[in-house]
Amino acid sequence: MADNVIQLKAGQNIPLSGEVLRFGVKAGAALDVSALVVAENLRVRDAADFVFYNQPSTGGVALTGDEVTITLAEVRADAKAVLLVVSADPAAPGGGELGPVTASLAENGALTAEFAITPAAGEAALICLEVYRRGDAWKVRAVGQGYAGGLPVLLPAHGVEVSGGADASAHAPHPEGDRAAIAGPRQSQHPAEAPVLEVSHGLERLWMIFEDAARSAAALVSARDYAAKRLDEELSAAVSDPATRNTPGAEAKRKEAQRRSDELVAVAEGNHRRDSEHLMRELAEADRLLPPALASWSSPAWEGNAKISDGIRLGELYAIERGPLRIPYCVPVPLTRPLWIDTERSAAVVPVVGALLARLLASDPGRRTRIDVIDLTGAFTGLLAPLGPVLNGPPITEHGDISPRLQALVDAAELAEMAYTSGAFTPPAEHRVLLAADFPHGYQASDAQRISALTLRGDLIGLSIVIVGSDESESPDGTVAALSQACRHLPTVEDTPLFDPWTGSAWQLELDLLPRDPQLAAKLLRSE
């Protein structure tokens, strides 16, 4: 492997300078390679934008053998990106599940970058890389987004229609062997260690803004640290000789050292302030254009026509010591990993849960949502009243009723998996949401096992999982601990930092709250 080949990490992007790109993969099993030419919303214009073995070329993108070639100048002008995809051959050993994959990208014949991906949850298809426009230039991003449902779910998510069952249309190679439901990246990550914004579909613009903010923050922190270190060294040198420590010459050296340090910090802070002001203007513009599920509560998007979204906003990231810039904290939907709201008291996070449910409902206004609620303490009684039309039965308030409700969801997921195996599966027509509050208190050990099973198979019934309870990552119960570690935690305690994935800069998270106005809250929860 050449020394100058960049080993990409998830979320990382690099500029491209070549005119012709070549995408390939290395893996231990038979794989299919394909590509999608997509617009700003990461959806194809028509079926011709899907390049695979039965349709090996479109403008600027061609499949030859097991490689995809992209001639950038020939990609249609209104295309935003080319998604580079790998999927498992269902006839191969392993039953259609992907093993470790290394994606590679070459420019003008020279290998530029590699991205190693290790699927962790039986994914049958992956978006490995995204080659996308940024102004007049092109860049590549390491995505690594997995789909347990394989191509029958990946393709519709990007606008390609796929027939269900064994007679699936020729738009999807080998669809009869793929499980069909989305299950995005499931890397174990805790908020104190985790990347805090993921790219997926319409989230790209926010992802780019956050990356720019992270790099600007890192430059500021680095400059401050360097200035402090240099000042300390120069002050130490000025007083190192006892004979001259208290002379006018030593005092002049100390003042000059302080001046240079202040000047360096002032320049860095000025650069960061300029960057932040630009990003705040960009965010203000984006907030008017985003679908409601990604927009602020004050955005006019909530008053306009409903728009489908592939992500929801959970709050804002900020750092007081770095100025007023606040970055939206967003995740893809359906939830690719369960959300775990860290709290000792469910009643304390009712507005947080309300905001989350309102955004889940707004993410796909044309699709029916059904919500199962476990609320042993009755903390969410007032919140759930306006949600009556979308509740899947009365909220569970008795311990003995938890297991049957969870088992019903597990049974539905297992039936969907059987349908997938038999080739008779159709993607879920509903968005299911499980709100499991007060966890794990009052739950049986078998209930934790059921929820764990749903984190792996719930995608087959379109399920998003939200857990409310204290962080159990260190629980002596192995099942509970593993479940907690598999979730994306939302801290509700101040001074619990999150760290961005590019530079490791620390950010604080302020979670969105459902507006206090009862009429507005009811409207956001779809009761009016």
Image (spheres, rainbow, N blue to C red):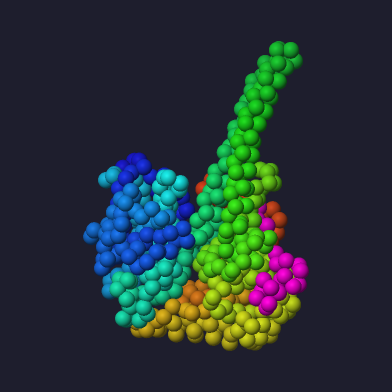
Numbered-mark total:
0
Camera sees residue 472: no
444 over 356 or under it: above or below: below
State which quarter of the image contains the C terminus.
bottom right
Q: Residue lying at the far right in this picture: please name it.
A: 517
Q: Is residue 272 above or below residue 297?
A: above
Name the residue rendered at 58%, 80% in the picture.
Answer: 370
Image quarter of residue 366: bottom right
Task: Report the quarter where the N terminus lies.
Answer: top left
Residue 509 among magenta residues? yes
Q: Residue at x 31, y 42 (%)?
A: 2
Q: Which residue, as the protein is rendered here, is positioned at the far left?
A: 65
Residue under the image location 36 percent in, 42 percent down:
17
Give the image location of residue 429, x and y in percent.
Answer: 49, 79
Along the viewing direction, whichever of 426 and 146 lies nearer the viewer: 426
The question of residue 59 being in magenta is answered with no
Q: Quadrant of residue 526?
A: bottom right
Name the residue at 54% across, 86% down: 408
Quarter location, residue 477: bottom right
Q: On screen, 66 above or below 464?
A: above
Image x and y of residue 273, in percent: 64, 39
Point out residue 255 in the picture as x, y percentages from the top left corner.
Answer: 71, 20
Nearest the eye: 249 or 338: 338
Q: Which residues are magenta?
A: 508-528
